[in-house]
Amino acid sequence: MMRDALRIAWFLLPLAFFLSTLALAGESGEAATQPSPAPQGNAAESLAQESGEEPPPGGDFTLQSSTGPVSLHNLRGKAVLLYFGYASCPDVCPLDLRTMADALEDMSEETRARVQGIFVSVDPQRDTPESLAEYADFLHPSILGLTADEKTLREMATRYGVQYYRVEPKGSDLPYAVNHSAATYLIDPEGTLRFIFPHNTPASVLLEASEYILAQFPKVVE
């Protein structure tokens, strides 16, 4: 069984950070190294390995959507699939966000009603709450596009172990790109960060882990 504590592939995050250069490789046309395939069998449990690294604390946040502020504490009762990136990302973000969307689509209606996808843009200069709403809704109606001012984003990124910085890729039509760590975070219905999945984790693993978490928090019948 998967452990109750945060154990999912924290040791893989350094790899996930370097895999984020796929975004730049997509701009330059250079070949990118693909990560190893996920383990067979109970993939979510296989990824739940002990690590000597101290996991990030996660925690509450308040970010801006097209309809106003969204706080993690207002999503109590739902599991949250959280991803950091930016809308102009040419490769890594679309792949991981498509995977999140596929996981949401494969859920039963009952499960999907208890899972909230969130895409946090670390590029607030270009990604407005309004443009993110369009981007996220195109991916899946259960995904929210959020951002904030730079100070708020940096504080949140630190608590979630996210690294990002601007670069100016040669031969690109974009004025800059944002190199960023690539991982999907699963937060339980009480707001606790439970699992971290590296880049290219299959949708089936996100689905299985979400169901596992929700099984520990039975839905309250009103």
Image: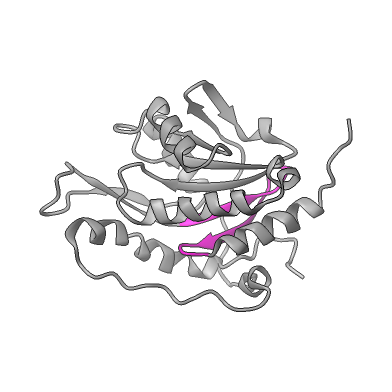
Where does the image place residue 102, in percent across and percent down from the top left? Answer: 55, 53
The number of discs equals: 0
Residue closest to the eye, 122 or 118: 118
Q: Is residue 51 above or below residue 174?
A: below
Where does the image place residue 194, in percent across and percent down from the top left? Answer: 66, 55
- For the point 68% across and 48% down, the residue is 192
Where does the image place residue 129, in percent across and percent down from the top left? Answer: 42, 27
Residue closest to the eye, 198 or 140: 140
- For the point 70% across and 48% down, the residue is 188
Q: Quadrant of the N terminus?
A: bottom right
Q: Quadrant of the C terminus?
A: top right
Q: Is 76 colored magenta in this rendering?
A: no
In the image: residue 7, left or right of residue 33: right
Among all residues in the image, which is located at the extreme top? 67
Q: Quadrant of residue 151?
A: top left
- For the point 66% across and 78% down, the residue is 41
Q: Is residue 57 visible?
A: no
In the image: residue 44, left or right of residue 197: right
Residue closest to the eye, 161 or 134: 134
- First to last magenta residue range: 183-201
Q: Is residue 56 above or below residue 70?
A: below
In the image: residue 43, left or right of residue 98: right
Where does the image place residue 44, in percent across and percent down from the top left? Answer: 65, 68
Q: Is 189 colored magenta in this rendering?
A: yes
Q: Is residue 100 visible?
A: yes
